[in-house]
Amino acid sequence: MAYTVRELGRRTFADFEILAEQQGSCWCIFYQRAKPAGRGLSPAEQRRINRRDKAAFVREGRSHAILVYDGRTPVGWCQYGPADELPRIDAGRGYHKVGRPTGSERLWRITCFFVDRKHRGKGIATIALEAALRSIEKRGGGIVEAFPVVSERMAAVPEWRWFGTPSMFRKHGFERVAALGTSGVLMRKRIPPGGSRATGSSAAERSGTARPGRGR
């Protein structure tokens, strides 16, 4: 199966919409807001507001993600971005105790994944993660954070698997930093600016089937 990847942007927002409608009302915007929004609104109203605000972030170049395609069909994504683009993480009690890493290196975050039901179990999330790490490397590297779920009970719920698994990140060089409550863990990886490959090659990459897409 030949999957391709593209960055989220104005030209790919319509493809993102196809997946976001499947996900629900979140529109992958939760971590882009420093404070909660939409309390007391119906799911339909939340969806409308989230879609509007997400579209604005994308137009302004303040929302990053990797989209994965099967042919011309979008089948999954991985959201990533500079820490200041995803400020909600800082509000977490567990993260607040640890704090941002010291130093002058740029801080990046990988917050969540989503894969179309029909394409789950085919390595889509891994393809998206590897593309996100390559993108971060090209943008100057830095410290990359991830927040996978470690609770088996929560990991059994599809929505919580959106954060990835510890083993998935360990395979790509991430190391455990601290627990985030009883359900999650903070992991970090350093990517040198213009340095070595951000990640090892997946089976898809080795066979030459995972490559940047050139449009719909």
Image: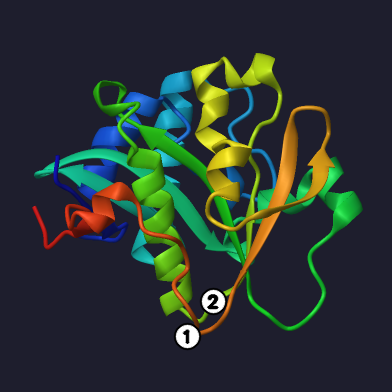
Question: Can you tell which mark lies on residue 99?
Answer: none
Q: Position of residue 161 (x, y in %)?
A: 53, 28
Q: Is residue 212 left or right of residue 162?
A: left
Q: Is residue 208 left or right of residue 127?
A: left
- Compared to residue 209, the image places residue 28 above or below, namely above
Give the amino acid type for the residue marked by disc 1 in the picture: Gly
Identify the element where label 2 is drawn. loop
Q: Determine if residue 61 is in view.
A: no
Label 2 crowding class (10 Å Cα cut-off): few <14, some 14-19, many 20+?
many
Q: Is residue 197 left or right of residue 181?
A: left
- Compared to residue 120, the image places residue 188 above or below, namely below
Q: Determine if residue 2 is in view.
A: yes
Residue at the spot 79% in from the left edge and 80% down from the top edge = 103
Give the amino acid type for the residue marked by disc 2 in the picture: Gly
Q: Quadrant of residue 208?
A: bottom left
Q: Is residue 183 left or right of residue 44?
A: right
Residue at the spot 48% in from the left edge and 78% down from the top edge = 196
Write down the residue under mark 2.
141
Residue nearest the viewer, comparing 204 with 93: 204
Residue nearest the viewer, comparing 202 with 15: 202
Q: Quadrant of residue 164?
A: top right
- Mark 2–mark 1 Cα distance, whole angstroms, equals 7 Å
* Colour treatment of the image: rainbow
Write down the residue under mark 1.
194
Residue at the spot 65% in from the left edge and 44% down from the top edge = 147
Label 1 crowding class (10 Å Cα cut-off): few <14, some 14-19, many 20+?
few
Image quarter of the N terminus: top left
Tell me if label 2 and label 1 are in contact, CB under 8 Å: yes
Q: Position of residue 89 (x, y in %)?
A: 70, 49
